[in-house]
Image: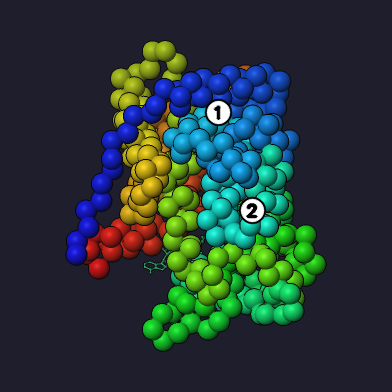
Amino acid sequence: MAYSFQFDPIKLPPEAEALRREVRSFLREEQEKGTFRPGDKRQSSFSPEFSRKVGAKGWIGMTWPKQYGGQERSQLERYVVSEEMLAAGAPTRAHFVADRQSGPVLIKYGTEDVKREVLPQIIRGEAYFCIGLSEPNSGSDVFAASTKATKTEGGWLINGRKIWTSNAHLSTHMIGMFRTSPATPENRRHGLSQFLVRMDTPGIEVRPIHNLAGYHDFNEVVFDDAFVPDSHLIGEKDMAWKQATDELAYERSGPERFLETIFALMELVREAGPNPSERVAEGIGREVAHLKTLRRMSLSVAGMLQAGKMPVVEAAVVKDLGTNWEQALPAKVRLLGPPPGKTDSGNRAGYDDVLRHATLIAPKLTIQGGTREVLRGIIARGLGLR
Ligand SMILES: Cc1cc2nc3c(=O)[nH]c(=O)nc-3n(C[C@H](O)[C@H](O)[C@H](O)COP(=O)(O)OP(=O)(O)OC[C@H]3O[C@@H](n4cnc5c(N)ncnc54)[C@H](O)[C@@H]3O)c2cc1C
């Protein structure tokens, strides 16, 4: 049956706007103290110190149940916090993955012991998560994973490799997907299980991979008889294929899916000044119109998640349109802005630096979190076209 996707209209409630003011004032104070400089990509965006401050404000795990230290606030309030942090260029990388998806997965499928131990650590900004899905021979096709978890007394022994694991070298935990049984002829996705893995477990080696921009963000992670206790199996054995789909709706639709190169546009606005030429004003206006539309769609997905829906196709649409837009943005800014070396940046991170960084990270944007082609496959299936 054909499916038509729908973006429910959404208006932020007054408590979300009040929270926005609070977050902005916190971020302004932190900037004044020199904790971070917006748009300066030479500073690390992974800052346990900053994450602990955000934790103390109650802005990590804020939608989670009170019994684990959360506040049961709405997805829309969480959206506002994420959006303000990203727009300000705050260093949220340490807690972002746990707040966005690892915590919700543990809440839904984790054992009670794990929830009581780990969720409060995340909420305080003390536990940092990476995602162990991709392997050298299974990227888009995550269900072809072959890194094994073999049953042993009291737990599991993990052997094999994960690759492109963002922040594995800085994280305290991974949620990884490992093979616990062979696939079946009826269901090739069967046989994989999710586990919570402590990154300081003996038998885990994290090897750096440097990206195109020269930074060490992702890694290869090698497991050699790494032991994981029974209580760290997340959900049902062999059934990760069901659980992982839920996780992706959270991963794909947030403001981080169109704000990664936004600093290039902000620098262009700054360089253009109060009286831009008609050509530059028109170019900026066009990009801001796209941005506003993407934001409304992404916010709508947050609203639908809040309403208990599972908008998988809508989330894929936001990621596809959002990452394509943010990927094309640096080249558009380059065409509209002054030639390199012709700007006066004072002591802030300058136009040239920001544009260079945005250009170098642009290629990855349509790969991470699911490639453009794979997302379009999901959308086509959702529409009943394949
Ligand atoms: C910056 C960055 C950070 C990342 N962080 C993580 C992380 O933290 N954890 C993690 O597990 N992974 C991570 N990844 C890995 C990412 O999820 C994979 O790179 C991605 O899923 C693609 O897999 P692949 O690289 O094996 O490419 P492949 O799957 O081999 O794809 C190669 C090409 O073939 C196309 N293709 C593949 N299958 C199909 C299909 N069925 N139909 C049409 N076209 C297809 C793809 O679109 C792509 O263009 C990260 C990647 C990047 C770039």
Q: Is mark 2 within 8 Å of ligand 1?
A: no
The quadrant of the picture occupied by the N terminus is bottom left
Q: Residues within 10 Å of mark 2 (few under 14, many from 20)?
A: some
Residue at image position (45%, 16%) is: 273
From the image, tell me which residue sits under label 1.
88
Q: Looking at this view, name the residue that lies furthest to the left.
A: 1
Quadrant position of residue 207: bottom right
Residue at image position (49%, 41%) is: 256
**Label 2 SS:** helix
Q: Residue 336 location in percent, x, y? A: 39, 30
**Amino acid under label 1?**
Ala
> Which one is in front in this view, the residue at disc 2 or the one at disc 1?
2
The quadrant of the picture occupied by the C terminus is bottom left
Left or right: where 204 falls relative to 143: right
Q: Is residue 191 above or below residue 78?
A: below
Which callout, 2 or 1, points at the residue further toward the start of the chain? 1
Q: Residue 279 location in percent, x, y? A: 31, 24
**Label 1 SS:** helix
Q: In this view, does 82 lie above or below 319?
A: above
Q: Is residue 301 shown to the viewer in this render? A: no
From the image, tell me which residue sits under label 2.
115
Left or right: where 365 falls relative to 167: left
Residue situated in front as seen by the camera: 161 or 121: 121
**Amino acid under label 2?**
Lys
Q: Could you say which disc has been placed on residue 155 in the image?
A: none
